[in-house]
Image (cartoon, rainbow, N blue to C red):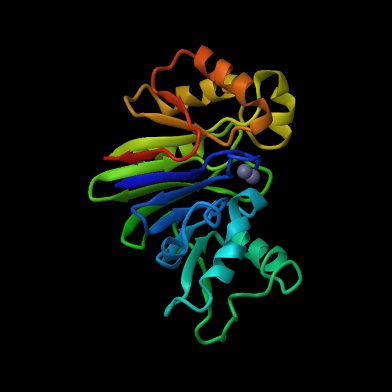
Amino acid sequence: MKIRVLGCFGSRVPGRSTSCLLVDDKLLLDAGSLASTLNQAEQVSLDDILITHAHIDHIIDLAFLADNVLTSRKTPVRIWAAEPVLDAIRKHLFNNVTWPDFSLIPTPENPVINLLPLPAGKQAEIAGYQVKWEETNHTIYTTAYCVEREGHALFYSSDTTTTTAIWEMTRKCENLKIAFIEASFPNRMEHLAKISGHLTPEMLKVELEKFGDRDIPIKVFHMKPQFLEELRAELAAIGDDRLQVLDGGEVFTF
Ligand SMILES: [Zn+2]
Ligand SMILES: [Zn+2]
């Protein structure tokens, strides 16, 4: 499995892109920054995208992807998410006001994108991967994912504040090799983190007790860029050797 970090921040400033992971050059986890990081050929070759939730920092580049690959693909790009997430994407992004409804363009029979609900249950094979999901504790319906292929799995928390189900899911993910977990606001902003459905480094430390004492690299993402130096210092102060604060552009292979 090869994971390329296209974006790992909770907002955008020059040189910092929003949440987006590319798995094996073909499966995308969230669509926060593919249009500004993948070239045209790489965008055309994306077949499947797993979306965690409908906040703009996780879906914005679905709009530009649909536009960029409109005449270049023979089959629709499959965009997978829980039904409440798809419902929000239909209503608020591809609604013929904010952006055209690319699920009907160029033709309803063969559109550029298909919006596909996650199958019933909490696991399924999607795009050749065994995918598990659980709802996180965020301000809108959001799923965390475990994605596995050939005995190697990743965990992606998406946006979350204090919770339990997603950590239990990681225990069922026996072949876990890497975990991407969010930390958005510095410790002094715990109130803001809680009401916006996020974690501070101190809150992350408590969540990691639920994740367990497993020897798995933990990549921290979704930092708000204006607090990055403060977050780096506070994450280092946790003293957990497994933690690495992402900067964007990293490639992990295992
Ligand atoms: Zn976010
Ligand atoms: Zn969010």
Q: Position of residue 13 (x, y in %)?
A: 66, 40
Residue nearest the observer in this picture, 155 or 165: 155
Residue nearest the observer in this picture, 190 or 4: 4
- Residue 193 left/right relative to 72: right
Residue nearest the observer in this picture, 155 or 236: 236
Q: Position of residue 201 (x, y in %)?
A: 57, 22
Name the residue at 66% across, 28% down.
185
Image: 245 above or below 3:
above
- Residue that sits furthest to the left in the current view: 150
Residue 55 appears in view:
no
Q: Where is residue 145 in the image (x, y as percent from the top left)?
A: 45, 47
Name the residue at 63% across, 48% down.
57
The total of numbered circles placed on residues is 0
- Residue that sits furthest to the right in the current view: 97
Q: Where is residue 40 in the image (x, y as percent from the top left)?
A: 47, 64
Name the residue at 65% across, 22% down.
186
Quarter of image, ligand 1: top right
Residue 58 appears in view:
yes
- Residue 150 left/right relative to 134: left
Name the residue at 45% across, 55% down.
28
For the C terminus, the image quarter is: top left
Residue nearest the observer in this picture, 242 or 36: 36
